[in-house]
Image: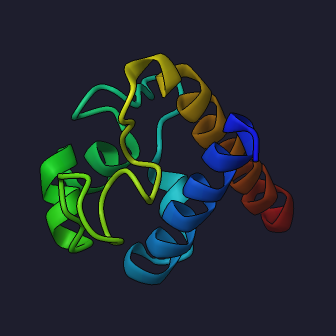
Amino acid sequence: MTKKEIVARKVDRGIKLLDREAGKRWARKINLKDFELTNWMKCPLGQLYGEYSLGAKALTLSLYDQGKKNVFAYGFNVNNYADAPLLEAEWKRRIRLRQRRKVAKAK
């Protein structure tokens, strides 16, 4: 499995969790112009819950790379910062698609 495929799976897991816990319209609350995965206030959890650690707590995700339910497994953080641009790009791509789909449905 390529890095890109691994990242896509993690983001998919994160999206499904947010759909379940934050509601299907969570992507509308994300400001992609300010989006930064490595910024605790501008990442998906930061934008939705006020800050990264509060979002992790609300979703009952471990902040550490332990067990199956942690921020790394759901694509909210990276083990290696060299992978951050790839993960951020995938989050932006997927959020943009969801935001566009909602706009299209509203028209």
Residue lying furthest bottom: 20
Percent position of residue 106, x then y? 78, 65
Q: Is residue 17 above or below residue 107?
A: below
Percent position of residue 101, x then y? 80, 58
Residue at (85%, 58%) from the top-left corner? 104
Percent position of residue 67, x then y? 28, 69
Tell me if 36 is positioned left or right of 48 in this view. right
Tell me if 43 is positioned left or right of 93 in this view. left
Percent position of residue 87, x then y? 55, 34
Tell me if 93 is positioned left or right of 55 in this view. right
Residue at (38%, 79%) from the top-left corner? 21
Residue at (36%, 41%) from the top-left corner? 77
Q: Is residue 13 above or below residue 35?
A: below
The answer to which of 81 and 16 lies nearer the viewer is: 81
Q: Is residue 22 above or below residue 86?
A: below
Q: Quadrant of the C terminus?
A: bottom right
Residue 15 falls in which quadrant of the image?
bottom right
